Image (spheres, helix red, strand yellow):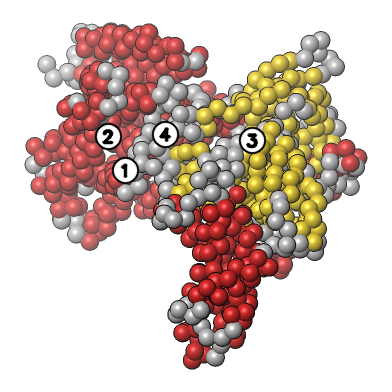
């Protein structure tokens, strides 16, 4: 062997020793743990805009560069896993031959002196033939389940016994399992995608465009080895692609077949909670004579051509809705009749310019915690969720319920509003009239918007009351003008605006007194408008107003005061709908599981073998001495010493009975 | 010394397992078979193939465990009898829980669990009483109360299982589906593992310490029931409707229970270590078990926990492949399960290959409990994910 060769060989040995060392393995395990903790503390795979908002531009860039938004597919994390596989493999490579040797090695070369060094050893002097001693020991150890080998020399015999090779098999099984599981996991991860991306073969699509507009470079053909993607298919529709979320965008995965959805169903428990989500699927494939029809549900996927199809979510598949848009600002009073389709948008002419109405969702059921005792949940009926976007692109999001919802025992049309998806909805409560519609409120509100009629009415009131403590001194026309102006301010900006108007016009010292008068005037006029409305509805006004009607007046006042904050030029009232659902499917192709599952089995088996079948060794050494036999029992165990001590004691006690009986 | 004209004779015990069995074992086998057949004939129509398999495996496991630990024979028989009695008092009407005397005060799931709670707390006190007084009677009372509490906990869960079907045939499910139920499971499994070691190592001195953590779990159960009213039976969300729940959850709690026990043994180890150094003649130094025994129990318990936790995580992955569309999604619960697993894997490597022993390992075992606790509770409280079944 040349000098360079030995040098080479020793370098290789050092490298193997390093890779297979326990220290490296522990370091890698710690690194995986730390990375995993980061991945759970920092929520993964969120839209990049959310991260930007949360961390600011500087840290966003830092985290992005470190790959912290997708820790588990970050290059450095994959490298750590790769090293773990390598380290474990080297560990197995280095230890396996020794393990197999030791399983078969009965240590027959053991010397008397070395046997005495074991933790457990005992001695007897027996005046019986050596063969007899040997056979009785043999019998006993075999009875205790030991495998035995014998060796004889000139004046001695050695009986060597082993029990339980589980710890060594356990080591092999668990460590090979780890390698298999990691390799399988890496196969099912997106390593290949990352390589293809770095080679420029694929490019992430970030735009929100329809599937057939997606360019070739963002598409993956159906030969792709592993993927896990989602697709939403409306009832009656079909799809032959899925979307793979990737970094801050997605890729389009072509499927080797087409999935059609005939029906999607949600079943509910009596209490209202969802009980099952089911989709009736039809798999259409050229290679099939007949399409496959199968119903899938949560926990019951369909597997076809190595692709598993799971029930993952559901949503709206383009429900058709009829909506009445009641103008809340401007001169128009008549509602606009609209037809809409969920997931589509349309233009809407308003007093504030052309708005873009984006219909985002329709829900048939809304299960809410019930205010009643005893029933935990109840259904408050259908709702629509939409955005109204102004010409400059600002949008608010709304959530409108179709039916009035009981709150504190009274029915209201609820409409939630928020400026960003991160906020909770703030609700506008429009009181429903006795026939359960929004008409009375809208009629009342429209009358308050009608400045001309309001002025006439105010003039009438002012003339009729001539002071009387309600109307201050001054011309009646002045008063009527002020009254209608106050209502105008109120309708446009609520009570806050009225207070603002008082503050800007009246000197501070008089403010309190005047404010009181103004509020009285305002309430009086509102009251008269309301009573006139009831009269026009055909109610008799001679009797005292019913509790319902007077509470309605208060609620209507509160609602009008909140309209300014509501910030929409319309109230959209959902009138009717045709519900079309979409099922959310997840499709997975994971060939890695053919390694992972056997790996898991080996891991479980190995762990139990390792702990519960530890290796134990016993030796019985017989030497002819002084006409008799000197018997030496000796034993050791690598682990579970306390259990072994007990077992040793049992063997010892039996031998004691035989070799030195007390009788 | 044996003389040369005598023949050496070995009196070996009976060889085979069958010959080693006592009459009581045969009665036990018969009872278990009858029980399994009864369950099968009564409930087969509610079970799928896998669940029938689980029933058979459960019966076989119980049989084998009963042979090697005869106390289980009495425990399971009593659990079965009391549960059947409770079931019969219902007569198919859930309202009986409030009307029937036996249900109201003993065997409705809520009452049985209250008994369990009270007995565990009293057993904790009794164990400490025994530790300081060494009166044998007190020790026996402590052990009996722990057995009794465990029995009532099992009875409570069995009856609760039945109650869930009384609410609605489609609501019925094994009661391991929310935090309230799994805390009961945790308590009784931890207690059983402890009782096993109590017998095996013939010492009660760990009892008080292990029961402390069970008492803490009981505290949580009571708070959860009375303050949060979270003790009601809720129908299962679709993702939980699977036979996997019957094996994944119990396996997990054998793991959690064993880790918790190991941590408490770690605490005893550290106390013993300290009192031996400071006051070797003191009461504590005398009463607490030897350090090497504590070390052994700690290792055994972590090994047991690790084996079952590995199994549970694998079962969880297989279930996830059916319910969530992939065997591993780096969901926070999965990730933390991995962290717990890596932690104990490192502990075991250090002990088995590097030979680490003593106080550092005891400390590590105690810290391990906090990692486990975060995986069990912290993930539900602070992190959102797919596995959000037990929310606080």
Task: Determine if residue A495 is in view.
Answer: no
Pointer 3 local density, CA inside 10 Å: few below 14, some 14–19, many at least 20 = some
Q: Residue at x 20, y 40 (%)?
A: B118
Q: Residue at x 34, y 44 (%)?
A: B229
Q: CA distance from mark 2 to mark 3?
A: 35 Å
Circle 1 residue: B225
In the image: residue B133, left or right of residue A21: left
The quarter in which the C terminus of chain A is drawn is: top left
Q: Residue furthest right?
A: A216
> The disc numbered 3 marks a residue on which chain?
A
- Occupied quadrant, residue A488: bottom right
> The disc numbered 4 marks a residue on which chain?
B
Circle 4/circle 1 CB separation < 8 Å = no
Circle 3 residue: A313
Question: Closer to the camera, B133 or A329?
Answer: A329
Q: CA distance from mark 4 to mark 1?
A: 14 Å
Q: Which comes sooner in the sequence, label 2 or label 4?
A: 2
Q: Position of residue A621 (x, y in %)?
A: 36, 23
């Amino acid at each position: 062997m040349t000098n360079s060769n030995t040098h080479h060989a020793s370098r290789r040995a050092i490298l193997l020793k390093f890779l297979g060392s326990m220290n490296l393995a522990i370091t890698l395990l710690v690194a995986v743990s730390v990375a995993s903790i980061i991945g759970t503390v920092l929520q993964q795979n969120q839209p990049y805009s959310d991260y930007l908002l949360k961390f600011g531009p500087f840290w966003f860039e830092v985290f992005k560069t470190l790959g912290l938004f997708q820790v588990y597919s970050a290059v450095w994390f994959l490298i750590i896993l790769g090293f773990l596989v390598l380290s474990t493999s080297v560990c197995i490579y280095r230890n396996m031959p020794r393990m197999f040797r030791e399983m078969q090695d009965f240590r027959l070369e053991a010397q008397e002196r070395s046997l005495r060094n074991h933790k457990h050893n005992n001695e007897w002097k027996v005046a019986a033939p050596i063969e007899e001693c040997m056979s009785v020991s043999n019998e006993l150890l075999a009875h205790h389940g030991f495998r035995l080998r014998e060796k004889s020399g000139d004046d001695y015999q050695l009986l060597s016994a082993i029990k339980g090779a589980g710890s060594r098999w356990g080591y092999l099984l668990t460590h090979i399992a780890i390698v298999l599981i990691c390799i399988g996991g890496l196969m099912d991860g997106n390593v290949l995608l990352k390589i293809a991306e770095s080679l420029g073969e694929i490019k992430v699509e970030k735009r929100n465009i329809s599937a057939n507009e997606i360019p070739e470079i963002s598409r993956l053909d159906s030969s792709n080895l592993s993927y896990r993607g989602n697709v939403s298919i409306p009832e009656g529709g079909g799809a032959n692609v899925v979307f793979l979320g990737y970094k801050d965008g997605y890729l389009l995965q072509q499927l080797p077949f087409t999935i059609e959805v005939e029906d999607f169903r949600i079943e509910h428990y009596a209490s209202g909670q969802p009980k099952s989500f089911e989709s009736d699927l039809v798999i259409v494939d050229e290679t099939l004579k007949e399409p496959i029809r199968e119903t899938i549900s949560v926990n019951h996927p369909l597997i076809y051509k190595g692709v598993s199809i799971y029930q993952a979510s559901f949503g709206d598949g383009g429900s058709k809705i009829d909506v009445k848009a009641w103008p809340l600002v401007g001169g128009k009073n008549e509602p606009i009749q609209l037809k809409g389709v969920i997931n589509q948008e349309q233009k809407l002419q308003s007093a504030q310019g052309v708005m873009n109405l984006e219909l985002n969702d329709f829900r048939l059921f809304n299960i809410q915690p019930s205010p009643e005792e005893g029933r935990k949940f109840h259904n408050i009926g259908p709702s629509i969720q939409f955005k109204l976007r102004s010409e400059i692109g600002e949008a608010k999001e709304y959530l409108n319920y179709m039916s009035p919802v009981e709150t504190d025992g009274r029915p209201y049309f609820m409409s939630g509003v928020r400026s960003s998806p991160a906020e909770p909805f703030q609700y506008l409560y429009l009181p429903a009239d006795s026939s359960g519609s929004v008409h009375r409120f809208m009629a009342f509100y429209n009358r308050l918007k009608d400045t001309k009629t309001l002025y006439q009415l105010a003039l009438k009131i002012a003339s009729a009351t001539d002071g009387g403590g309600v109307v201050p001194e001054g011309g009646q026309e002045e008063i009527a003008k002020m009254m209608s102006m106050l209502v105008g301010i109120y309708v446009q900006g609520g009570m806050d605006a009225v207070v603002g108007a008082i503050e800007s016009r009246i000197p501070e010292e008089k403010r309190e007194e005047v404010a009181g008068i103004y509020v009285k005037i305002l309430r009086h006029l509102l009251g008269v408008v309301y009573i006139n409305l009831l009269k026009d509805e055909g109610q008799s006004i001679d009797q005292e107003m019913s509790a319902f009607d007077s509470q309605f007046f208060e609620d209507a006042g509160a609602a009008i005061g909140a309209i300014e904050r509501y910030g929409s030029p319309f109230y959209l009232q959902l009138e009717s709908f045709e519900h079309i659902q979409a099922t959310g499917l997840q499709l997975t192709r994971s060939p890695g599981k053919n390694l992972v599952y056997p790996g898991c089995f080996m891991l479980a088996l190995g762990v139990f073998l390792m702990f519960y079948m530890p290796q134990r060794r016993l030796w019985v050494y017989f030497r002819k001495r002084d006409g008799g036999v000197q018997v030496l029992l000796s034993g050791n165990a690598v682990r579970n010493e306390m259990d072994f001590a007990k077992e040793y004691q049992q063997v010892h006690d039996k031998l004691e009975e035989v070799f030195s009986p007390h009788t | 010394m044996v003389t040369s004209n005598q023949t050496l004779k070995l009196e070996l015990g009976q060889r085979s397992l069958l010959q080693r069995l006592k009459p009581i074992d045969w009665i036990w086998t018969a009872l278990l078979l009858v029980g399994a057949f009864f369950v099968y004939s009564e409930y087969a129509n509610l079970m799928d193939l896998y669940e029938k398999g689980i029933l058979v495996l459960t019966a076989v496991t119980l049989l084998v465990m009963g042979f090697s630990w005869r106390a289980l024979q009495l425990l399971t028989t009593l659990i079965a009898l009391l549960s059947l009695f409770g079931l019969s008092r219902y007569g198919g009407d859930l309202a009986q829980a409030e009307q029937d005397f036996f249900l109201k005060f003993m065997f409705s799931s809520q009452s049985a669990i209250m008994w369990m709670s009270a007995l565990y707390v009293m057993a904790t006190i009794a164990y400490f009483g025994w530790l300081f007084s060494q009166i044998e009677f007190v020790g026996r009372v402590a052990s009996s109360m722990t057995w009794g509490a465990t029995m009532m906990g099992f009875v409570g869960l069995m009856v609760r299982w039945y109650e869930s079907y009384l609410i609605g045939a489609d609501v019925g499910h094994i009661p391991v589906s929310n935090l309230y139920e799994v805390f009961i499971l945790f308590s009784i499994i931890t207690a059983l593992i402890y009782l096993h070691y109590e017998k095996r190592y013939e010492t009660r001195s760990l009892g008080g310490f292990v029961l402390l953590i069970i008492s803490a779990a009981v505290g949580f159960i009571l708070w959860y029931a009375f303050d949060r009213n979270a003790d009601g039976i809720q129908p299962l969300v679709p993702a939980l409707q699977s036979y996997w729940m019957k094996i994944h959850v119990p396996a997990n709690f054998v793991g959690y229970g064993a880790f918790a026990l190991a941590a408490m043994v770690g605490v005893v180890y550290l106390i013993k270590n300290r009192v031996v150094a400071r006051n070797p003649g003191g009461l504590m130094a005398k009463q607490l078990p030897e350090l090497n025994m504590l070390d052994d129990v700690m290792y055994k318990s972590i090994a047991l926990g690790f084996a079952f936790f590995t199994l549970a995580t694998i079962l969880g992955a297989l279930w996830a492949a059916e319910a969530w569309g992939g065997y591993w999604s780096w969901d926070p619960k999965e990730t933390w399960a991995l962290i717990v697993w890596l932690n104990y894997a490192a502990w075991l490597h250090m002990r088995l290959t590097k030979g680490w022993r003593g106080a550092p390992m005891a400390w590590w075992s105690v810290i391990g409990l906090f990692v486990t606790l975060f995986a069990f509770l912290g993930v539900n409280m602070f992190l959102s994910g797919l596995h959000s079944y037990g929310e606080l």
